[in-house]
Structures are given as C-alpha cells and as structure tokens.
Amino acid sequence: MRNSFELFVARRYLMAKRKQAVISLITVISVAGVAAGVMALVIALAINNGFRNTLQRNLVGATAHVTILEKEPGYGIRDWREVIARVRRAPHVVSAAPTLYGSVFLAGPVQSSGAVLKGVSFAPGAPLPGFISRLKEGSAAALDDAHGPPGILLGSRLAQSTGLVLNARVNVISPQGELTPLGPRPSYHWFRVAGIFESGFYDLDSGWAFTGMAASQRVLALDDVVNAIELRLDDIYAAPEVARSVEAMLGPKLAATHWMEQNKQLLGALQMERAVTVVTIGLIQFVAALNILISLVMMVMEKHRDIAILMSMGARREQIRNIFMLQGVLIGVTGSAIGLAVGHTLNYFADRYHWVRLSEEVYTIGFVPFEPRWIDSLWIAGAAILVSFLATLHPARAATRVAPVEALRYE
C-alpha cells in the first residue's frame, strides 16, 4: 500500500498540469533526452556489431582459422603430408588441407588483370571455403576435364572486370616463368572458367582465383610442394591456443598464425570504435540526467506546500524521498522504452532494405549492416535508468528537508 501511494503521487506529479509550464517542458525534454540517448546507442552498437560480424563471417569463411607457413621464404613445404598427419591430432582441429598460391595475370577479352591464383584440393571430402561450395555460376566438379584445359574458379568482380564468363577460355600468365638459355621468361597456360564465386568480401571477389593443386604447381613451376597448410577448427575462438600448440609440434622451420592475428588491426579498430561510440553517445544520457535534475529541483521548489501537507498528514520523510526518486525512475523507464522501440524498429528496416549504401572498394561490403543484440539493449536500458535514478538523489534529499511548519506558516 505504501509503494502504491508513493507511485500514485509520483505519477500525478509528472502528468498533472502545473502552474509552471516550464517544469512540464523540462520533463518532456528529459524523457526525449533519455529516449534519444538509448536509441542512438542501440543503433550505433547495432552498426558496430553488424560490421564486426559481417567482416568476421567473410574473413572466417574465406580464410583458414589457422595457417601454417614457412618462417623464412624458401622452396615451399615438401613434407606437407607428414605435417598434416601430425596437426590433425591437435585439439579442435577438424580438417587440414594443403594450399599453394602465387601472383599471376589473367588475359581477358576486356582487359588483363592481376590476381592471386590459389591451388587447393577438390577431392571428395576435402575442406573448402563455403562460397566455393555455393558457386554463383558453374560447378567445382567441372574443374577436371580430361578433354580440355583445366578449370579455374574466378571471383565475380574479377570475372566482370576482365570480361570472362562461364566456360570461357582464359590465358593465365605466370611472371615466375620458365628458365631458358636466354634467361627467365613468363609462362602462359590456358584455363577454362569452370565457375564464378561471390564471397561477399570485395578483396576476395576482385582479386582471387582458385584451381586444383596440380594445375597451380604447373603454373608456378613447382614440384610437389605447398606454401601453406590451412586448418579449420570446431571453435574459431580457440584459434590462438591451437596456433601455439601446433607451432610447438612443428619444429623451428614452420610457424602458425591465426585469423585474429592476421586481421588484428581491423578487429582492434572495430573494438576501439565501439568504446568511443559508447563514451560519446553516453554524453547524451548525461545531458538527459541534468534535465531530470533540473526538473526535479524546480518541482521541489514548486511543491513545498504539497510536501508540507503530505508530511502533516502523516507521510514519512522516506516516503517523500521515494516519491521524487520514483519520478526520475519513471522518466528513465519511459525514455528507455521509447528509445528501445524506435531504435530496434529503425535497425530492422535499415538492415532489411539496405538504407545506407557503401562503396565496396573501400568498405568491402555494399551496405551498412545493422545487427542489434538483446544483451546490449539490456545494459543500455539499465544504464539509462540508473543514470536517471542517480539524478534524483539530490532533489529527493532536498524534499525531505522541507519543514511543514515553515512551509504552511503563511497559508
């Protein structure tokens, strides 16, 4: 009953018409400030989460979780079969596959373009990036053709820039070339476009091509060697631990790196951006708290007579204090609810209809992704309500110091 009385009076003070209209205006501004801060923070963190998750999905889908390389550039990893047999026994390792990649030129009908040619194993059961299994055009099964040139898979942007289409013949030029009595010269190799992939990652789609291991070794003029062994894990966040354990069993000539280390600068920048966003937009909540403080201080000044009457009728000082604290909490709860509703609504439509377009050449994705998380919404709303509550402490304390006799002396 006591709580119902305090809540009833707090709601009446917030919603009833007052002699001083400016107090009502400040209350509305306070609610709007809390709502704006919550909405802005929900949208900003949704953008940060969207960028991080999208880039992480693209990176993890396109690259290995852990990569084994030579510590010093040499002639490649010759005992790669033995290395694979050893690292497959490491914890969290689901698969291990050899790869060989190098820089080449593609001579297309529109223009020539540089690319990274990556040789992988397309044997049944061999681990492949997800986008290779879901080609935009063609099929990875058509790579091996006994009656024609070997197949090659091109990124969609690379195919578009060179003018190459499915089943077209392409001349792959290797700058490493062949050694002749007159010196090294480029080597030329004919391939057939067996498929076109689209990973969603601009750098990959615009500059990478995939083919079989034997074909890449022939183009790069190498024998049975590879320059990397790629591991895929059952838990991508265990990559640093797996990289350390694998490197310990490989010996001094090989090193292991993981996807977090390879993209450390990008992931670190996103984490720093998240922290800066929280601090910057948190200032909006600080301004809203000042509005709440001013509104309640002015209300205490206006309600001296009402407070005195309540206290003379038996209301205790802690009840008077709770009335003003509840007013601040009600402002925080109302503003948080409005901010969450508006923020999540805008996030949904902005992500669904791609409201904010981006240049893929700069950001690697074509639009701003919005991915809100419920855990972020909980702590944002909790922080807004807490700030609103803290803003009530001084006015509520001032309200309990009202002396009924002094306030009613001239009434």
Image: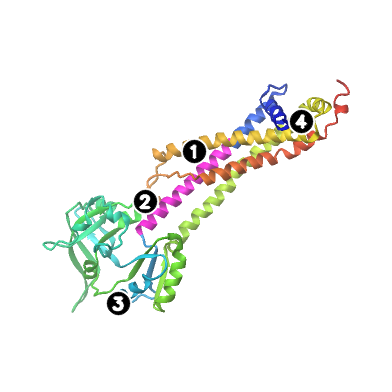
> Disc 1 marks which residue?
344
Give the residue at x 56% y 43%: 378
Q: Which mark is in front, 3 or 2?
A: 3
Report the disc number at residue 74: none
> Disc 4 marks which residue?
300
How far, Cα to Cα, is label 3 from label 4? 82 Å
Is residue 390 rendered to the left or right of residue 148? right
Q: What residue type is disc 4 on? A: Val
> Disc 2 marks which residue?
361
Badge count? 4
Report the disc number at residue 78: 3
Which badge, 3 or 2, comes first in the chain's sequence?
Answer: 3
Q: Which quarter shows the N terminus?
A: top right
Circle 4 Cα neighbour tier, 10 Å, few/some/many (<14 / 14–19 / ≥20): some
Residues in magenta, as a range: 35-62
Which badge, 4 or 1, comes first in the chain's sequence?
Answer: 4
Which badge, 1 or 2, comes first in the chain's sequence?
Answer: 1
Does the image show residue 76? no
Residue 215, relative to residue 135: is it above or below? below
Mark 1 residue element: helix
